[in-house]
């Protein structure tokens, strides 16, 4: 939560930078990248703080891992802000000794972050929550977020162009063209080539999106009779998780083959529509099945019968 508070302050500073500093790096406003990282780290930190605080077991180990996550995030953000203030790029930059050292620090912090997140993700599988649907959502969301976090490593290798013509940059966000071309407003994702930031971002925030879906179902349950049974909500969470994982796979493939997010075609387009169609069909099947064959609510656990000593056999009273 300390890192989250720091990110609030950092976001405010970056907003001032966006308004007052006209410099650009790679075709984007120099303070836009640290602003986006501030907001993403803020959400990520608050989520893990909440999850770790509710772990019934391994609390000491989880607290240590959470502290490592927080420090790694802070180190990465400090490096990004320092590069922005200097008017240069932070990621993949090995053009000078200072830039190389900065990128090396970031690479170490990202690796440490991944290991610590892997440890805390495993611990979540011992974390019971009020409903089965929410328990499944939290565990699945954390696992998918770990996959999304790991996709960042796909950006760190040199491209063919960099191997042919070294310019002090090793690694890239985009596939097929050099970084810095036309992109979506604010997000900056490439509109002319594949962009590995997209599956990385989408995957990381499964940690919030899938549990929020389960929470929304829980809130709707008192108003919609068809969602009253948690078993129905759990099936819908499983459908949403499967669709999210399949969509993440399609987005990763789209980026790797160099297709823009706004211009999918061929097999990627077919795969995307197939995932959407399968998710809708599965959702309808779950809801129709619940409407036609409502399952009786699970019986609450019964307390053991109380035996009156006056009615019990003598042997029982003596024992």
Image (cartoon, helix red, strand yellow):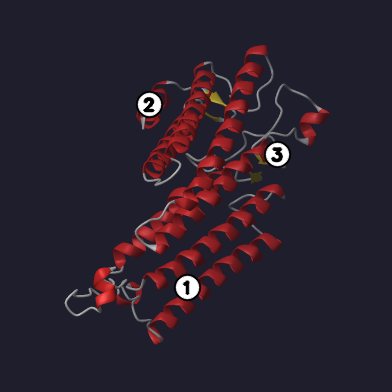
Q: Earlier in the sequence, mark 2 or mark 3?
A: 2
**Circle 1 is placed at which residue position?**
283
Q: Position of residue 126 (x, y in %)?
A: 47, 51
Q: Among all residues in the image, which is located at the extreme top?
A: 97
Quadrant position of residue 219: bottom left
SS class of the residue under badge 3?
Answer: loop
SS class of the residue under badge 2?
Answer: helix
Q: Position of residue 234 (x, y in %)?
A: 44, 67
**Circle 2 is placed at which residue position?**
6
Q: Earlier in the sequence, mark 1 or mark 2?
A: 2
Count the numbered circles shown: 3
Q: Residue at x 35, y 26 (%)?
A: 9
Label disc, if present, on residue 177 of the rendered structure: 3
Label disc, if present, on residue 42 of the rendered structure: none
Question: Which corner quadrant holds the N terminus?
Answer: top left
State how far apart marks 2 and 3 are (Cα): 35 Å
- In the rendered view, would you say 92 is above or below 263? above
């Amino acid at each position: 939560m300390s890192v989250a508070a720091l990110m609030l302050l950092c976001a405010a500073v970056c907003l001032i930078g966006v308004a007052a500093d006209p410099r650009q790096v790679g075709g984007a406003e120099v303070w836009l990248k640290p602003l986006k990282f501030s907001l993403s780290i803020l959400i990520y930190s608050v989520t893990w703080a909440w999850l770790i605080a509710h772990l019934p077991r391994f609390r000491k180990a989880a607290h240590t891992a959470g502290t490592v996550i927080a420090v790694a995030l802070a180190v990465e953000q400090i490096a990004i802000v320092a590069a922005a203030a200097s008017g240069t790029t932070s990621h993949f930059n090995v053009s000078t000794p200072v830039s190389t050292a900065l990128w090396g620090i970031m690479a170490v912090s990202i690796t440490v972050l991944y290991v610590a997140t892997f440890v805390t993700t495993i611990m979540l599988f011992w974390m019971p929550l009020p409903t089965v649907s929410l328990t499944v959502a939290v565990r699945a969301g954390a696992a998918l977020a770990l996959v999304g976090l790991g996709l960042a490593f796909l950006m760190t290798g040199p491209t063919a162009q960099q191997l042919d013509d070294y310019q002090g940059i090793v690694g890239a966000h985009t596939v097929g063209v050099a970084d810095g071309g036309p992109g979506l407003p604010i997000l900056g994702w490439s509109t002319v080539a594949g962009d590995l930031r997209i599956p990385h971002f989408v995957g990381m925030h499964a940690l919030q999106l899938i549990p929020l879906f389960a929470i929304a179902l829980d809130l709707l349950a008192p108003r919609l009779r068809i969602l009253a049974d948690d078993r129905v909500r759990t099936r819908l969470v499983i459908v949403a998780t499967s669709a999210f994982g399949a969509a993440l796979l399609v987005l990763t493939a789209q980026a790797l083959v160099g297709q823009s997010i706004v211009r999918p075609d061929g097999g990627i387009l077919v795969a995307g529509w197939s995932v959407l169609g399968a998710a809708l069909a599965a959702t309808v099947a779950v809801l129709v099945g619940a409407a036609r064959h409502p399952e009786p609510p699970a019986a609450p656990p019964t307390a053991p019968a109380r035996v009156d000593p006056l009615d019990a056999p003598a042997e029982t009273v003596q024992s």
